[in-house]
């Protein structure tokens, strides 16, 4: 029901058939979605993310797991304009690459989903938050967009600037990616710092062999 509603609303905004043509493409495999669900720190500002797209992304939260089914996360959608300027003024990206001053000028995100909690943050809330953010990121990729999970931000300023009734615990930037990201396989113990070379953002990932805890040999 929720998905049908969103498709109809999208067609109201962009015209009949637009949902299938733009925002609701045929679903790729999970492996493909996971591969494309990267942390983008630069966006194409010629593309305007619509509130209907943000609503479709937030809607995954009515279907994902929640600790003891308490569903204590709430979501505030922000599109381009004065509110996006407030958010951009109080978020920080690319802490491991301070010399680049990310995002680069002209590639700032213009759409956001602010995730709030109705109770003080705790271990259960953080589990719910991880499930929510990953699920929303995958939905964004399905819609042809990209995201960045931001936890390094000024909470009080964003809460006040957006008149939020609850404390924000994460910011999800959403937009059309304007950078190329590639994964690099490394072994356990090697550097996990992401880096940039010739305009490509590289992200080290440990091999499956090193992630799995094997049963000791007899």
Image (spheres, helix red, strand yellow):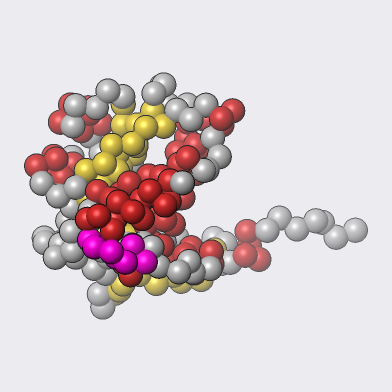
Residue at point 53%, 64% (across, down): 30
In the picture, the quarter occupied by the C terminus is bottom right
- Is residue 156 visible in this depiction of the protein? yes
- At x 24%, y 48%, the residue is 51
Query: Does the magenta portion include 16?
Result: yes
Left or right? Give the position of 43 relative to 129.
left
Q: What residue span does the magenta drawing correspond to?
A: 14-20
Identify the residue at the far right of this view.
Answer: 218
Q: Position of residue 37 (x, y in %)?
A: 41, 61
Choose between 157 and 78: the one closer to the eye. 78
- Residue 131 x, y percent position in the rendering: 50, 44
Residue placed at 85% from the left, 60% from the top? 217
Whether residue 136 is visible here, answered yes or no, is no
Q: Which of 206 and 170 lies nearest the eye of the viewer?
A: 170
Residue 75: x and y in percent read: 33, 36
Image position of 190 (left or right of 86):
right
């Amino acid at each position: 029901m929720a998905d049908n509603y969103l498709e109809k609303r999208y067609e109201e905004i962009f015209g009949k058939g637009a949902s299938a043509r733009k925002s609701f493409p045929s679903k790729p495999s999970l492996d493909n979605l996971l591969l494309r669900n990267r942390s983008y720190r630069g966006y194409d500002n010629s593309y305007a993310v619509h509130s209907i797209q943000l609503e479709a992304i937030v809607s995954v939260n009515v279907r994902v797991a929640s600790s003891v089914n308490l569903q204590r996360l709430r979501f505030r959608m922000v599109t381009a304009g004065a509110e996006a300027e407030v958010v951009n003024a109080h978020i920080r990206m690319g802490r491991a690459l301070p010399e680049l001053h990310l995002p680069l000028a002209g590639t700032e995100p213009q759409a956001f989903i602010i995730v709030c909690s109705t109770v003080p943050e705790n271990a259960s809330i953080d589990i719910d938050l991880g499930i929510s953010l990953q699920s929303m990121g995958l939905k964004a990729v399905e819609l042809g967009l990209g995201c960045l999970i931001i936890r390094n931000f000024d909470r009080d300023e964003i809460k006040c600037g957006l008149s939020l009734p609850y404390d924000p615990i994460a910011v999800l930037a959403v937009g059309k990616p304007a950078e190329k990201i590639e994964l690099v396989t490394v072994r356990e113990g090697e550097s996990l710092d992401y880096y940039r070379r010739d305009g490509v953002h590289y992200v080290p990932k440990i091999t499956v062999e090193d992630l799995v805890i094997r049963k000791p040999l007899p």
